[in-house]
Image: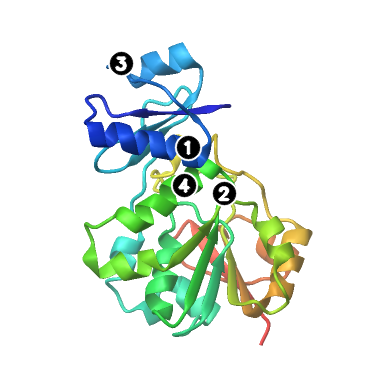
Amino acid sequence: MKTIVTTAYRPTAAIIAETGRVGRELDIRFIDRKKRSIEKMHSDEESDILVVSKERLEFYPMGKAEPFFFHPNSAAFRTKRPLERDPLIEVSGLEKGDSFLDCTLGMASDAITASQHVGPEGKVVGCESNPNIAYIIRSGLQRYSTMPHLTDAMNRIDVHAMDSIAYLKKLESNSFDVIYMDPMFTEKIEESSNFTPVRSSADMGQLTEEWVTEAKRAAKKAVVLKAHFRSQDFEKFGFTRRVRPNTKFHYGAIKLS
């Protein structure tokens, strides 16, 4: 499905200029809004739509009335708790100054939590295969200002718009302390609603032997998996599962050192 970029309903000159810049950076067409609704634009243009407003970027996949946009999501409350007790930090063994690769960036809440924990001496990289989602997340990480305690952590995250396996294959062995993967759940979790508008656009690729093998080669300390509690991927690929009672997802790790 092709994507076009347009403005908010009543754009200013600055928004029009910004929309043109976004279109050039993503190499997609800038279409005049002409005060049309998103539904009307979907019908007229037969395209996914990226909307530029003063506050944020919004992505409307074809046929969807609700937008996808950046928000720190669960990182907003996770980073206000002792990070050493966060389940991702605990199971991964991630420490201050470590490097962390998030193979499935999504809303970036895990990457933000990791970045807050590793601090300015650490490094956090995220892969997102959908270029529109990657662009929105990258922009949001740089522009979001509602939670000042996360600003530095968000600004430090390096977003790559590419498939994670392709990215892993480019890496030398032992490139990151911790490599993390959170494939899109095959079983929908109702509480995870922020990503709902783009589920049809997101990469639904599931865990493979190649993915795990490349991650184990490129990681120093651990490869970490997050999956639905019913998933058999933990046992299938050799992850030690951390059971979390009364939760709909578990973490597992392959310890390498």
At label 1, counting other C-alpha atoms closer than 10 Å, the crowd grade (few under 14, some 14-19, many 20 or more) is: few
**Position above or below: 152 against 209:** below
- Disc 4 element: helix
- Give the camera-side residue of 177 and 87: 177
Q: Name the residue: 47% across, 16% down.
A: 45
Q: Is residue 19 visible?
A: yes
Sequence order check, earlier mark of 1 and 3: 1
- The label number, if any, that marks residue 184 in the structure image: 2
- Give the camera-side residue of 50 and 111: 50
Tell us which disc is closer to us: 2 or 3: 3
Q: Amino acid at mark 3?
A: Lys
Whether residues under marks 2 and 3 lie with C-beta atoms below 8 angstroms apart, the answer is: no
- Disc 2 element: loop
- The label number, if any, that marks residue 34 in the structure image: 3
Q: Quadrant of residue 74?
A: bottom left
In space, the residues marked 2 and 1 are separated at their CA atoms by 30 Å
Sequence order check, earlier mark of 4 and 1: 1
Q: Amino acid at mark 1?
A: Arg
Q: Quadrant of residue 41?
A: top left
Sequence order check, earlier mark of 4 and 2: 4
- The label number, if any, that marks residue 135 in the structure image: 4
Residue 49 rendering spot, x and y as whole percentages: 44, 28
Give the residue number, with chain letter if any, for mark 1. 24
In space, the residues marked 2 and 3 are separated at their CA atoms by 36 Å
Q: Amino acid at mark 2?
A: Met
- Disc 3 element: loop
Q: Is residue 72 visible?
A: no
Q: Name the residue: 67% across, 50% down.
A: 206
